[in-house]
């Protein structure tokens, strides 16, 4: 189109990283068709070119967020609209590759320019193609597989605080999960974290089925807003067109929300709760709702990290996230807390695609652990402890060591067997209050219940 060949020179203002340009529709002899989210090319008088994105249209005034910043750009610069939103490369060649916040390779490999591209702002798949979640993603993390199953098509965050090993845990899940493809989205990562994810995926031998999109802390803020859309656009294509079971990992969604806040403030939008924009919920939901199990195709499962400033679950980001997602994993003190964690879809798989004793073991272990916490409180207040209290204290220590520690890796069946073993080491059969048929089948008999370290 002729419009996309025209350069506009009427720069009205440059504020922060935002350029406002006046677009004269008469110069193109037609109505301007530039849309929100479209790309533009900004060229300064010295020939320097920068990529920008349309973030506001007000009549003939168009505001652009310049990816690389406006430093060095003068009001004598020109703007040319490209007529399309950001596109990301999609082909089998992107597996094992690392891309930056605008989809360009940052691993030193080929630029993949001839490969097909897909828009990151395209419509989602027809909701009629969605089917009810019914398949489990095994992670080899006992606190997930046994107590809060990760289900295909689920969207679920890891709630944590600064200083916790949530990135290390996220990498382990990506490595151990039985997914066909892992799509990783890093938002505002420091270089150490970026290098950690890359090296862990490589050392574990899963890099060939992984694609990474990374915005580093030193990269432009606006690119942070594009990374989730790129990752999810690619994940949808792999799931729908190739029938792959795709696991999308994103860290940290609080950094993503902070980037939205910073851009909104620079555009003089009226802030809402604690400075965040009023559309925080809808912006988060737009990304999370990409999780889906497609009829006759693959699935997209989303696991993210959401840090809670000050360990405040009422902070706008975790608070809004909780209304969108189907539960959460609560990570603190290097352990997954069984009381703060929840998977609302686990009932779709427990006992249906897992072993018959799964539901009983899950409920019994949590019941005893809650009682163990009560016994620990009695002990801390110097109350006399009964023999049963002593059993509970022993169980609580074993439960934390064998199951809650995020460094523990066990297949589901082994974790269920270890659960029975732990119960046998602490309690008698008549104290379990479980179905007798299951006790007869799975409870270790005398002479077969040796202690497990």
Image: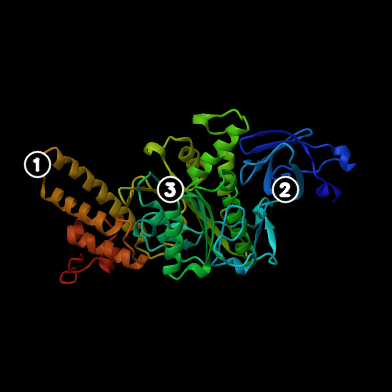
Q: Nearer the viewer, mark 3 or mark 1?
A: 3
Name the residue rendered at 29%, 54% in the picture.
364
- Along the polypeptide, which appears first: circle 3 or circle 1? 3
Residue at numbered disc 3: 328
**Which residue, given by chain and number where applicable, does mark 2 sit on?**
41
Left or right: 335 as drawn, with respect to 156: left
Which residue reaches farthest left? 384
Residue at 61% x, 30% y is: 269
Few, some or many residues within 10 Å of mark 1 (<14, 14–19, 20+): few
| Cα–Cα gap, marks 1 and 2 | 75 Å
- Can residue 133 be seen here? The reply is no
- Element on which disc 1 rests: loop
Residue 260: x percent and y percent? 56, 39
Classify mark 3: residues with Cα within 10 Å, few (<14), some (14-19) or many (20+): many
Q: Which residue in the structure is indicated by mark 1?
A: 384
CA separation, marks 2 and 3?
41 Å
């Amino acid at each position: 189109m002729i419009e996309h060949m025209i350069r506009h020179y009427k720069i009205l203002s440059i504020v922060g990283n935002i350029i406002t340009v006046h677009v004269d529709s008469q110069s193109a002899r037609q109505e301007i068709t530039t849309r929100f989210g479209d790309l533009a090319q900004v060229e300064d008088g010295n020939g320097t070119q920068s990529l920008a994105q349309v973030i506001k249209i007000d009549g003939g005034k168009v505001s652009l967020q310049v990816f690389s910043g406006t430093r060095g750009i003068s009001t004598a610069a020109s703007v040319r609209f490209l007529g399309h939103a950001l596109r990301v490369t999609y082909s089998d060649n992107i597996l094992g590759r690392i891309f930056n916040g605008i989809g360009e390779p940052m691993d030193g490999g080929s630029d993949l320019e001839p490969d097909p591209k897909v828009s990151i702002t395209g419509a989602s798949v027809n909701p009629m193609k969605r089917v009810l979640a019914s398949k489990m993603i095994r992670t080899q993390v006992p606190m997930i597989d046994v107590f809060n199953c990760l289900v295909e098509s689920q969207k679920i965050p890891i709630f944590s605080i600064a200083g916790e090993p949530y990135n290390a845990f996220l990498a382990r899940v990506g490595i151990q999960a039985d997914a066909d493809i892992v799509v990783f989205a890093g938002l505002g990562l420091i270089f150490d974290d970026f290098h950690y994810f890359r090296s862990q995926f490589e050392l574990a031998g899963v890099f060939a089925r992984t694609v990474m999109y990374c915005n580093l802390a030193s990269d432009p803020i606006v690119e942070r807003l594009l990374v989730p859309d790129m990752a999810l656009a690619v994940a949808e294509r792999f799931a729908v067109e190739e029938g792959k079971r795709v696991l999308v990992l994103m860290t940290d969604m609080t950094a993503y929300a902070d980037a939205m806040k910073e851009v909104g403030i620079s555009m003089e939008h009226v802030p809402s709760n604690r400075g965040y924009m009023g559309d925080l919920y809808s912006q988060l939901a737009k990304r999370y709702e990409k999780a889906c199990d497609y009829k006759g195709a693959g699935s997209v499962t989303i696991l993210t990290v959401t840090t809670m400033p000050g360990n405040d679950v009422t902070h706008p980001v975790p608070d809004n996230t909780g209304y969108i997602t189907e539960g959460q994993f609560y990570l603190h003190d290097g352990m997954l807390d069984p009381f703060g964690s929840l998977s609302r879809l686990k009932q779709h798989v427990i006992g249906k695609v897992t072993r018959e004793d799964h539901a009983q073991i899950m409920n019994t272990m949590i019941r005893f652990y809650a009682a163990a916490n009560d016994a620990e409180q009695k002990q801390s207040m110097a109350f006399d402890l009964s023999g049963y209290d002593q059993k509970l204290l022993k169980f609580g220590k074993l439960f934390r060591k064998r199951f809650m520690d995020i460094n523990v890796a066990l297949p589901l069946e082994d974790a269920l067997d270890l659960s029975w073993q732990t119960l046998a080491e602490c309690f008698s059969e008549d104290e379990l209050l479980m179905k007798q048929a299951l006790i007869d089948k799975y409870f270790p008999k005398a002479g077969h219940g040796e202690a497990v370290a």
